[in-house]
Amino acid sequence: MNPARKPSTAPGSPGALAFDPEAIRAQFPMLGATMHGKPLVYLDNAATTQRPRAVIDSVVEHWSTTNGPVSRGVHALGSLATEKYESARTAAASLLNAEPEFIVFTKGVTDGLNLVARSLGDELLGEGDEVVVTELEHHSNFLPWRQACLRRGAVLRVAPITDSGELDLDALRAMVNGRTRIVAVTHVSNVLGTVVPVSEIVSIARGVGAAVVVDGAQAPGHLPVDVQRLGCDFYAISAHKMFGPAGAGVLYMSPRWVDRLEPAQYGGGMVELASAEESTWITGPHRHEAGTPNTEGAVGLGAAVAFLGSFDRAAARAHERSLRDAIVAGLGQIPKARVYGPAEGAPIVSFGLEGVHAHDLATVLDAEGVAVRAGHMCAQPLMRRLGVPALTRASIAPYNTHAEVEALLDGVRRAGQIFA
Amino acid sequence: MNPARKPSTAPGSPGALAFDPEAIRAQFPMLGATMHGKPLVYLDNAATTQRPRAVIDSVVEHWSTTNGPVSRGVHALGSLATEKYESARTAAASLLNAEPEFIVFTKGVTDGLNLVARSLGDELLGEGDEVVVTELEHHSNFLPWRQACLRRGAVLRVAPITDSGELDLDALRAMVNGRTRIVAVTHVSNVLGTVVPVSEIVSIARGVGAAVVVDGAQAPGHLPVDVQRLGCDFYAISAHKMFGPAGAGVLYMSPRWVDRLEPAQYGGGMVELASAEESTWITGPHRHEAGTPNTEGAVGLGAAVAFLGSFDRAAARAHERSLRDAIVAGLGQIPKARVYGPAEGAPIVSFGLEGVHAHDLATVLDAEGVAVRAGHMCAQPLMRRLGVPALTRASIAPYNTHAEVEALLDGVRRAGQIFA
Amino acid sequence: MLESLYQQILLDHSRHPCHHGRPERFDAEAEGHNPICGDKVRVFVTLKDDGIEEVRFEGAGCAISQASASMMTNALSGLSIDDAKAVRAAFLDLVAAAEPDKSSGERVNEELRSMSEVRRFPARVKCATLAWHALARALGEALKGSGGPPSGSVGGGKTG
Amino acid sequence: MLESLYQQILLDHSRHPCHHGRPERFDAEAEGHNPICGDKVRVFVTLKDDGIEEVRFEGAGCAISQASASMMTNALSGLSIDDAKAVRAAFLDLVAAAEPDKSSGERVNEELRSMSEVRRFPARVKCATLAWHALARALGEALKGSGGPPSGSVGGGKTG
Ligand SMILES: Cc1ncc(COP(=O)(O)O)c(C=O)c1O
Ligand SMILES: Cc1ncc(COP(=O)(O)O)c(C=O)c1O
C-alpha cells in the first residue's frame, strides 16, 4: 500500500476536495527551509506550529503603525494600540465562541493553567478536598494541580486511561465524589491524539459542584472549540500551537469566575485603588492581566485566528486525517513499528520501533530533514502508564503533505535497517 | 531661553559630539507616523519605547528561518531555535553584567516581581516579619509585596521620600530591622526619574540579612546596570522599555537563589521527574521557565540589547539629559507649570499645570501630535504623597529631539491659554 | 479640532458646574470611578411622581468629566424616566458609538451636542460618559433593577 | 552523515556495552540524568594507587549515550587521574566545542574519535557527554572536591 496515492480527502466530505495543502504551505516562509541539506519536513506541530506570513505581517505592521501603550495612554497612539489589543481579544473570543469579557490574555497554556491552579486552587481547596486529573495530562496540567494539592492539604486523584489510550470515563465517574472540587482535563492528548469527552466530564463534575478546567493546547489547531457548549469553567490555549506567536495565549473564564477570582498577579492595569491599607481590583478580564500586555503577541494571535478562518477547516481536518491514517497504515507495514493511542483522534501519532531508542529514531529522521518529537513529551505519568521511557511523535498541520508522510516512513524504515 | 539651541551634548563628554538623534530616529518605522494630522512626537517612552527595525527584523528572520521548539526537540530546527533563545539569554546577561545561568526569561517586570514575591515571599515571610518598599514604587513592585504580606501575616513598611522626591535613605535605614526579610525598591522612579541608591540599600539590607529585590523597569534604557556591583538578589527588567518587544523580560536571580527558589509556575521544561508521588525540578534558570518559552520575544530582546550597544550610550545619555534640562527649563518659564521630582535624575519629567487637569493637558498635547502620559502612572501611593490626583509626564528616549521638546512646550503653553 | 473639543461652553461648565453638590435628600445615588485617571463622580437623583425632579453631582476630575456631568444634570432634571433614558442613549451614541446615528445629535440639547468632538479622542470617551454610567446605576437602583449596572472596568472592585 | 554517526562500532557498543553492570566494590559513583529524554547512567569508579583501576556503568538510554558510556569505560580504565582528565577534556572538546581543537581528535582513541559526528546533532551532544559528566562528579567525590560537579540541567533537582 502506498499512502501517497491516497486522496487528500476523506470520503463524504465534499468541500474537502477544494483543499490544497500546497496553497496553505506557500504562506509559511519557514517551510521552504532545508535541514542537513534536505528539505524540511516539519512534523513537530504539536510542539509548536509554524507562523504564516499573515501573522508575521500583522506584527510588523503593528510595530510600524500602532505600537504604543495599551489601555493607559490618553493619546491617539495609545488608543490605536488599545484597539488592536482589544480586537485580538474579540478574535480569540470568536474562536472559542465566548464573549470578549471572558477572555484573559496569558503567556500560553502553562501560564493560564498555573493562574487557575493558583487562584482557584487557593479559593476552593481545603484539607481533604480532591482534584481529579487524568493519566493523559501534560505536565502543565498535572504539576500545577499536584502542587496546589500539596499547598492546601488536598488530594490529587489521577483518572486512568484504557489500554487503547482513551480516557476511562467510568473510572473517572467513580473517582468524582462529594470532596471533588476541581476536575482538570486535557481536551486533546499531545501524545496519543486522544480527544477527551469534555462535555460528559462537565456533567459528571456538575453533579458534585466541581469546577472543570480544560487544557486546550492541542485543540483549536485541529477541532472546532465551543466553550459554551462544553460548559467548562476555564479553557486555556496557546497561540503558538495554532499558527500564532509564542508568548501569547488566552484563558477563557466563565462568567461565574472572571470578576471574582482573585488575580494570580498584581501590578499595573488591574488596580482600582492601591494603598498599603486598602487595595481593590477592577472587574473584567483586565483584572487578571497585570503589567504591560504583550500587545504584539495578541495581535499575532488575532491574525492566527483570522488565518484559521481563511480556509475550509472541515476540509483541512479531512486532509489532516488522511495524513494521520497514512502514517498509521504505513507504520503498520514496518516490522517492529508500533503505534500508540486510539484508532480515532487528532492528527498526532506517537510510535515506537522495537530495538531503537526514540531519540535515535528521531535523529535518523532528522538527518533526512524530517523533524519529529522524541522523548516523554512532558507527559511522564502517561509514559509510565504506557510502559515506555520515551516515544517518537509525528504531529500534523494542514500544510503537511502525503509526500512528507512518505519521507517520514522512509526514515523509519531506514532506522530499522541501521539498527537491524 | 531657547532650549532648542542647547547643544545636544553635555560638557566634558567628548565622544558625545558624535551622537546624532536623527540617525537613531531613522531606525524606527513608527516615528514617521502622524497623529491627528500632526507628526508624532513620542514622549511616552517610560510607558513603552518604540521598536527599531533591527528588532523587528530579528523576529521576522527568526520566524522565517529558525522557528521551532526550544530545548525539547531532537531535530536540527529545534537546535537552531534553542541556540537563538540561549544567545538572547547571553545578551541579556551581558546587559546586566551577569552570567547567563542567573538570567530567567519572564513576560516582563510585573511577571518577574510577582514571581519573586510569590516564591521568595512564601519562603522568607512568616508572621510578624517585615517587607520594606518605598513611596516611589510602581504598583507592580508594591502590590505583589502587599499581598505577600497579607498571605503570610507579615507587615509591609513603606519608606518615605523627601520633599524633593529623593528616597529618604535615613528613614529607610531606620525602618530596616531584625524582622526585615525583604527590601524591594525601584531603581528609577517611573514618575519622578529619581535614581535610587541601590548599592546603599543593599548594604543596609545585608546588615540584617534581608534580600533585596530591584524593579529595573526604567533603568537599562537610560543607565548602565551592573547587578554584581549593585549586589542585589533579584533585578527585573522588561524588553519593551528598552526598544524590545512587549511580553519579554528577564529576571536576574543571584547565585544564592536560582537553583533553590521554589518555582512560581509548574509545567513543561522545568521538570526532572514528574509523578503524583514525587516530582523534582531541574536547576538553572529553566527551573523558573515553565511552558513553551517566548522565543520570538527573547530574540527581540536580544536584538534590543544589540541595538543598545550600537551607539555611544554615554553620548545618548548626555543628549537625553539635555532634553530633560530643556523641558525643565522650558516649563520653568510657563506660568502655573510645576515640575515634580529631584533636580538630577533619569530623563523622565512629571509636571502639572495649575487649573488644568492632567488629562486635559495631555489631550491638548495629543491634538498637537505630542504623546505624553497623564494619570497616576500606576503609582497611586506616590500620587497621594505628592498630593495630586494625577500628573502629566514626558519621558525621553535617544531618538527624541530638541524640536520635539519645543512642540511639547508649545502645547503646554497652548493648554495654559485654553484654560486661562 | 482642539477648539471644537474645548469649546467655551465646556470650559464654563467645568469651571462653574450646575447642580453641583450633594443634595439634602435624594432617592438614589451611585458613584462612577475611572481607575485609569482617578476621576470620580457621585450622582444623586431626586424623583417625583412622573419622573426625575433633579439630578445633582459631586466629584473631581478633568474638564470633560466635570462638564459632562454638569450638562447632564441640566439636560435631565425635570424629565420623565423614559425621556431621560432616551437622552442618555442619544448622548452615549453621539460620543461613543463607532458610527453614531444621524438623529442622535438632534435628540440632545445644544450643550450636549457640543461634546460630540470627544469621539475623536477615544481615551477621553470614558471621561465624557462617567457621570452617565453612574446615573444608570443610580436609576437602576431607584427603579428597583430596571437596567442594572453596566459591567466593565468602572466600579465594582473587590477588596484584596 | 547518518552512516558516520551511527557507525558499526557505535552500534556494537550500544548493543554489547563493555564494563557494564554495578561492580561489587567501588570507590566512587555518580548518576547522570537527562531530563529531556529520560536517559540515565550511573558510573562507578574503582581506584588504585596510581589512578583508575576500572570504570563501570549501568543505565538505559539511547544508542549514543550507551555507546559513549561503554567507550568511556574502555578508554579510561587503567589510566592515571591526570590522563583520564586529559582524555575526558579532549573528548568533550571533540563532540561539544564550537570550534574543537585540532589535536583533540588525536588525544582520544579511535573508538572515541568515531563519535565526533555527534557534533552535527547539537541536541544529541548531551547524550554523548552524559556518562562523562557523571564521571567528573564521581571523581570529584573520590578526590574530595577536585573539579566538582558541572552545573546545569543535569541532576540536582529539588523535591517539590
Ligand atoms: C518603575 C516601573 N515598574 C514596573 C513597571 C511594570 O513593567 P511591565 O508593565 O513591563 O511589567 C513599570 C512600567 O510599566 C515601571 O515603570
Ligand atoms: C496538551 C498540552 N498541554 C499543555 C501544553 C503547554 O503549552 P505551552 O507550552 O504553550 O504553555 C502543551 C504543549 O506544550 C500541550 O501539548
Image (cartoon, coloured by chain):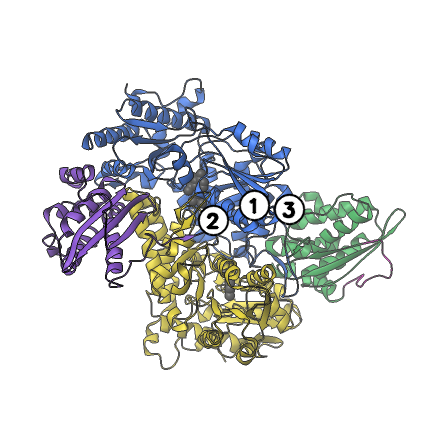
Chain colours: A blue, B yellow, C green, D purple
Instruction: Tell me if the residue at label 2 has its CB under 8 Å from ligand 2.
Output: yes
Instruction: Tell me if the residue at label 3 has its CB under 8 Å from ligand 1.
Output: no
Where does label 1 land, which residue? A154
Q: Subunit of mark 2?
A: A
In-front residue for pair B54/B406: B54
Q: Residues within 10 Å of mark 2 (few under 14, many from 20)?
A: many
Quarter-of-image position of residue D1: top left
Where does label 2 land, which residue? A107
Q: Is residue B28 visible?
A: no
Q: Is residue C24 shown in magenta? A: yes
Q: Subunit of mark 3?
A: C
Q: Subunit of mark 1?
A: A
Which is closer to the viewer, label 1 or label 2? 1
Where does label 3 land, which residue? C97
Report the quarter where the C terminus of chain B lies. bottom right
Q: Amino acid at mark 3?
A: Ala
Q: Is residue A247 visible?
A: yes
**Residues marked 1 and 2, same chain:** yes
**Residue at the extreme front of the image, as rendered:** D24
Q: Amino acid at mark 2?
A: Lys
**Disc 2/disc 3 C-alpha distance (Å):** 32 Å
Please report the bounds of the magenta region as a residue range: C17-28
Which is closer to the viewer, label 1 or label 3? 1
In-image side of B25 versus B36 (left or right): left
Q: How far across and down, in percent of the image, does residue C132 sit? A: 73, 52
Q: Is residue B150 shown in magenta? A: no
